[in-house]
Amino acid sequence: VPENIKLEQKILSRNDIIAGELRELFRREGIKVINMVSSPGSGKTALLEKTLEDLGRDLSIAVIEGDLRTENDAKRIAATGVPVHQINTGSACHLEADMIRKSLDHFNLKDLDLIIIENVGNLVCPSAFDLGEDLRVVLISVTEGDDKPLKYPAMFHRADLMVINKLDLLEQTDFSVDAVIGNARSLNPRIEVLQTSCRTGAGLEGWNRYILSFIPQSRQRIV
Amino acid sequence: VPENIKLEQKILSRNDIIAGELRELFRREGIKVINMVSSPGSGKTALLEKTLEDLGRDLSIAVIEGDLRTENDAKRIAATGVPVHQINTGSACHLEADMIRKSLDHFNLKDLDLIIIENVGNLVCPSAFDLGEDLRVVLISVTEGDDKPLKYPAMFHRADLMVINKLDLLEQTDFSVDAVIGNARSLNPRIEVLQTSCRTGAGLEGWNRYILSFIPQSRQRIV
């Protein structure tokens, strides 16, 4: 086994141990966790802004933002009034469970129902790193091409839900919704699918319902 | 120095040595090399198809395609009649100089004027890996957001040219061409900029001229 593969296995197994500890902590605290992954620019932050506007009064939500550099996304999220912590990974191409553990110091866990993690925009590297989440959501925008699941299989294989985003641009592209769903399900027959546009609002109600379905009724304030 | 940083330095310095050897080989053979990098779905393959249609008669071009999986891109390129070799990286998130070296067995170098490498779609990891290229081109599509240079600085810092692609979708986005250029130049004041749309053909003539300006006149057949 070459040196770099051995080290990769060591890093991944260390990550899995911490992720397991996080999952146990989240369970104990009654907090659900979503890990959002995608290419750069698929619209994760925009979808998150809408989600916080719509659900921020019903649920106590916190957000963890992952980027190599800048606080741009944290500022956008902070504007919605939701607690947010920005992780700057420097040159690292993904978030790791240990980074999430350290982020938790910035929140009062007792108060929280849901943590949404926005991973680094990268359709490759984040796939291997469990963050202790309940739900992994992969976004794909219609401008990216419907063959992306086949070209980046690990990401779609390990996701629970695929959100097809920027639906408002569909007519200006050659993207086929049927093809992308077929491609994703050829890798992961159980992957769920939603279609959204943050610009027109299409599909956002379904997305909100999907999130709420994971939160125990007792913790939902209005709904 | 932690173990993983030491290993990363070792991998990078080994890559730099091979890239240096490749650069010397390309210089000796009179072959120019372009390394195209971007997010998944920014339109690298579509731009390449147009380029090969426009320049494939004037220049002897070969293409190296990098993807985790599938031969989709190689098939698209092969349809233009240009020699192409697909590298499937498996789980690796970038191309390395050693992969390029092995690819060269598939081409007759004596015949070639230009090799275009389409890297794995990833705005992080390919930035650190020199492939022996003369020119590194980063594509960004207008649907990705104009802050991407600030969020993925290494990629824009090391590129010679930024191609702003999918210009036809500009009006349907909040993307500012001035902002993205300002952001890229704040990291890399000498980066050149072109704007293209493969759908309308806008800017493609300038892109072709840019490529031809790198090829010695003596090797251009018609032009």
Image: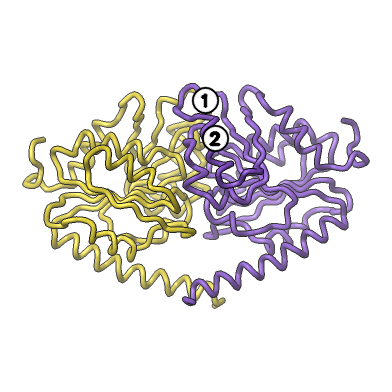
Chain colours: A yellow, B purple
Q: Is residue A206 left or right of residue B183?
A: left
Residue A59 drawn above or below residue B105: above
Instruction: Give the quadrant of the C terminus of chain A.
Output: top left
Residue that carries the numbered disc 2 in the rendered image: B141
Residue A51 shows in this picture? yes
Disc sitting over residue A14 in the figure: none
Can you give x and y, in whole percent of width and height, for residue B106 in the image?
Answer: 77, 55
Give SS at disc 1.
Answer: helix
**Mark 1: few, some, or many residues within 10 Å (few <14, many ≥20)?**
some
Disc 1: host chain: B
Residue B58 drawn above or below residue A26: above
Disc 2: host chain: B
Which of the 4 image quadrants contains residue B126?
Answer: bottom right
Give SS at disc 2.
Answer: strand
Kind of residue at badge 2: Ser
The first of marks 2 and 1 along the sequence is: 2
**Mark 2: few, some, or many residues within 10 Å (few <14, many ≥20)?**
many
Whether pointer 2 and pointer 1 mark residues with C-beta atoms closer than 8 Å, the reply is yes
Can you give x and y, in whole percent of width and height, for residue A52 in the image?
Answer: 24, 38
Can marks 2 and 1 be said to lie on one chain? Answer: yes
Towards the viewer: B177 or B222: B177
Residue at image point 19% right, 64% down: A25
Instruction: Give the quadrant of the N terminus of chain A.
Output: bottom right
Disc sitting over residue B169 in the figure: 1
Kind of residue at badge 1: Leu
Residue at image point 52% right, 60% down: B91
Which of the 4 image quadrants contains residue A192?
Answer: top left
Residue at image point 24% right, 68% down: A21
| Cα–Cα gap, marks 2 and 1 | 9 Å
Residue A190 shows in this picture? no
